[in-house]
């Protein structure tokens, strides 16, 4: 009778066995071996298959959430400095100051909605306060279309200031600027107001537990027609106005070239307006195109399969933080306007700094 000696299985052999087993599974069913382990909000771990459906979940959690948080952390302090600086430093307000202040207020209020959205996307949590969902989405779109309109008025103001250096044009008066600002808020709110109806109807259909973005809403209002109307009136027309003012400022400077060729303060408005036009073109165009494509793809007449719908949604998700990046970039334009705000703010900061040093030395 032969004696059989059982030797212990070495660790590397176990690893080789597991690797071989996994390799066999890869041929038959690759998903279990290649997919990462994902933990849900309750702490349970489960395997997540990286298909088109999960792609959107990953983008919302690891793309939307951190970018919204980053935009808030950078944009909120910058816009707060502008708002407080205008309140504290400026004693005599001009028309351009009113437009810039209104734009900064719009950006500041919008940025306050981002932490809540970032938290929801990061934790994959359902909506607990439907009213907060409606307010967040409403403020977001009011800011989206008021920002470009206020930039149009700033461009108009810069053009008129070059043409009428003595400020003897009616549109350069502060009272007129206040009226234009009030009408701007009114027009934008009228444009965005139907969104409230869409949001309420969509929330009701989903048992008040899911806060969808604009392109995913369903209600009595035709979302595609409404989105196309907003695209034309809220984006394309203001963008064309920015292009017109850029062209007019350039033409005016060419006519006055001999007189102002050594005056960089006159050339700065052209750079500001042209840069603003390029900024909105780059940031807003992908968002509006993909939003309309996303809504159109969900219509019955489109006949788009579910996988394509998921990929279209993923591309739309990628454009959303890009469109809202204007709230972070806008403060840069405030300091390039060429008015007295930058000098007054720096003087105020130096005075506060010197007073603080004197108090520390005296103490």
Image (tube, rainbow, N blue to C red):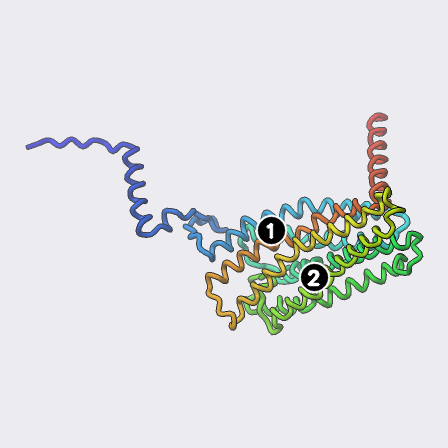
Question: Where residue 51 sits: x, y (%)?
Answer: 44, 55
The quadrant of the image that shows the C terminus is: top right
Percent x, y of residue 23:
31, 44
**Image point 86% across, 48% down: which residue?**
257
Left/right placement of residue 93 relative to residue 244 reads right
Q: Real-space Cα distance between discs 1 and 2?
A: 26 Å
Q: Tell me if residue 66 comes above or below residue 143 in the rendering.
A: above
Q: Is residue 118 above or below residue 127?
A: above
- Report the residue marked by disc 1: 118
The x and y percentages for residue 149 are 76, 59
User: How many residues crowd around disc 2 within 10 Å: few (fewer than 14), some, or many (20 or more)?
Assistant: many
Which label sits on residue 329?
none
Pick the front one: 53 or 267: 267
User: In what element is the residue under mark 2?
Assistant: helix
- Residue holding disc 2: 235
Q: Quadrant of residue 10?
A: top left
Residue drawn at x 50%, y 58% is 311
Q: Is residue 95 visible?
A: yes
Q: Nearer the viewer, residue 162 or 128?
A: 162
> What residue do we see at 75% from left, 47% from top?
331
Q: Residue at x 64, y 67 (%)?
A: 228
Q: Mark 2 or mark 1, which is nearer the start of the sequence? A: 1
In the rendered image of this protein, does residue 259 appear above or below residue 177? above
Callout in the foreground (1, 2)? 2
Extreme residue toward the left, this view: 1
Residue 133 in the image: x percent, y percent?
63, 60
The crowd level at tag 1 (other Cα within 10 Å; few <14, some 14-19, many 20+) is many
Asked if the residue under mark 2 is in contact with the one under mark 1, i.e. CB atoms within 8 Å, the reply is no
Q: Does residue 97 show up?
A: no
Q: Nearer the viewer, residue 115 or 318?
A: 318
Please count the marks in the image: 2
């Amino acid at each position: 009778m032969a004696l059989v000696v059982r030797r212990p299985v070495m660790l590397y052999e176990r690893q080789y066995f597991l690797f071989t087993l996994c390799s066999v599974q890869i041929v038959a069913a690759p998903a279990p071996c290649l997919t990462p382990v994902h933990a849900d909000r309750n702490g349970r771990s489960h395997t997540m298959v990286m298909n088109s459906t999960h792609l959107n979940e990953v983008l919302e959690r690891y793309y939307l959430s951190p970018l919204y948080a980053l935009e808030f952390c950078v944009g909120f302090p910058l816009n707060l400095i502008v708002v407080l600086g205008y309140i504290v430093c400026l004693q005599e307000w001009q028309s351009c100051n009113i437009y810039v202040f209104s734009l900064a207020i719009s950006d500041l209020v919008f940025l306050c909605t981002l932490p809540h959205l970032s938290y929801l996307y990061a934790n994959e949590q359902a909506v607990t306060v439907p009213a907060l969902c409606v307010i967040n989405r409403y403020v977001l779109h009011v800011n989206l279309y008021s920002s470009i309109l206020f930039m149009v008025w700033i461009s108009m103001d810069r053009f008129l200031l070059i043409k009428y250096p003595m400020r003897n044009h009616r549109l350069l008066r502060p009272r007129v600027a206040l009226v234009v600002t009030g009408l701007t808020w009114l027009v934008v709110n009228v444009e965005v107001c139907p969104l409230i109806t869409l949001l309420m109807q969509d929330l009701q259909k989903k048992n008040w537990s899911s806060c969808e973005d604009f392109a995913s809403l369903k209600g009595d209002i035709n979302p595609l027609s409404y989105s196309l109307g907003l695209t034309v009136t809220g984006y394309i027309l203001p963008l064309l106005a920015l292009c017109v003012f850029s062209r007019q400022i350039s033409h005016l400077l060419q006519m006055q070239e001999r007189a102002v060729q050594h005056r960089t303060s006159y050339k700065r408005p052209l750079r500001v307006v042209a840069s603003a036009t390029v900024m909105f073109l780059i940031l807003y165009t992908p968002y509006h195109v993909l939003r309309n494509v996303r809504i159109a793809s969900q219509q019955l007449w489109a006949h788009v399969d579910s996988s394509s719908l998921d990929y279209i949604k993923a591309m739309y998700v990628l454009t959303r933080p890009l469109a809202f990046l204007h709230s972070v970039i806008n403060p840069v334009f405030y300091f390039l306007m060429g008015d007295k705000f930058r000098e007054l703010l720096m003087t105020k900061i130096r005075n506060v700094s010197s007073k603080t040093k004197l108090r520390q030395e005296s103490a």
